[in-house]
Image (spheres, rainbow, N blue to C red):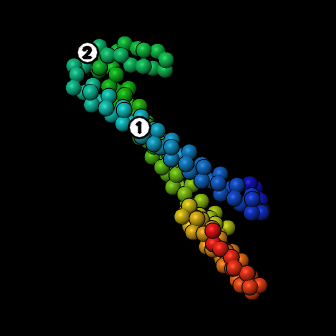
Amino acid sequence: MSAGPRNENEVLQEFQARRERIQVTWSKIMELGAEATEHQLVMDALQKLDKDRKCFRLVGDVLVERTVGETVPAVLKNRDNLKSTIESFQKQLEIQKKELAEFQEKYKIRVRSEGEVAAEEAAAAKAKEGAKAAAAAQQGVLVSKS
């Protein structure tokens, strides 16, 4: 938003959008991390094999026949690319978290847990019940708590 959020709903929508972007970035980091781990497992398995041994590699939708010696460098390159991509996403995530914290501080946004919300609702209900009992006592009427 160019001019910045103006009312409470816009602030809330912007806050939720920023949190969602953080969640998307985090899930992408986790996905790429799992892929990098898979590449490492493949590397561990291939390094124990003879370099001239035949192996198959999935490139896009095509299964390609290669030797272990030809496949290892490609898998290493992919793994290293995944790791560098993960690092850039992690930097991006830190920036997003910092921006969210600044936004939260600027608009004085406080995130409440479900427990806090439930406690506040219970306190409000108890106060309302107490007010009813006080009003009834002034009128000389008994009120049951059921």
Is 137 on the left or on the right of 76, as rendered?
A: right
* Residue 122 in view (yes/no): yes
- Pick the residue in front: 78 or 56: 56
Residue 13 falls in image quadrant: bottom right
Residue 86 falls in image quadrant: top left
Residue 144 falls in image quadrant: bottom right
Could you tell me the amino acid type at mark 2?
A: Arg
- Residue beneath the point at 77% across and 84% down: 139
Could you tell me the amino acid type at mark 1?
A: Ala
Q: Position of residue 70 (x, y in %)?
A: 33, 20
For marks 2 and 1 on the same chain, the one whose residue lies earlier in the sequence: 1
Q: Secondary structure at mark 1?
A: helix
- Pick the residue in front: 141 or 41: 141
- Residue beneath the point at 50% across and 47% down: 26
Q: Position of residue 19 (x, y in %)?
A: 60, 53
Is 25 on the left or on the right of 33, as rendered?
A: right
Residue that numbered label 2 is attached to: 53
* Residue 102 in view (yes/no): no
Q: Residue 34: give its label.
A: 1
* Above or below for 116 versus 47: below
Quarter containing the N terminus: bottom right
Quarter containing the C terminus: bottom right
Q: Position of residue 41 (x, y in %)?
A: 31, 32
Discs 2/1, front: 1
- Residue beneath the point at 45% across and 46% down: 87
Task: Tell me the distance, in whole angstroms, between the alpha carbons under discs 2 and 1.
Answer: 27 Å
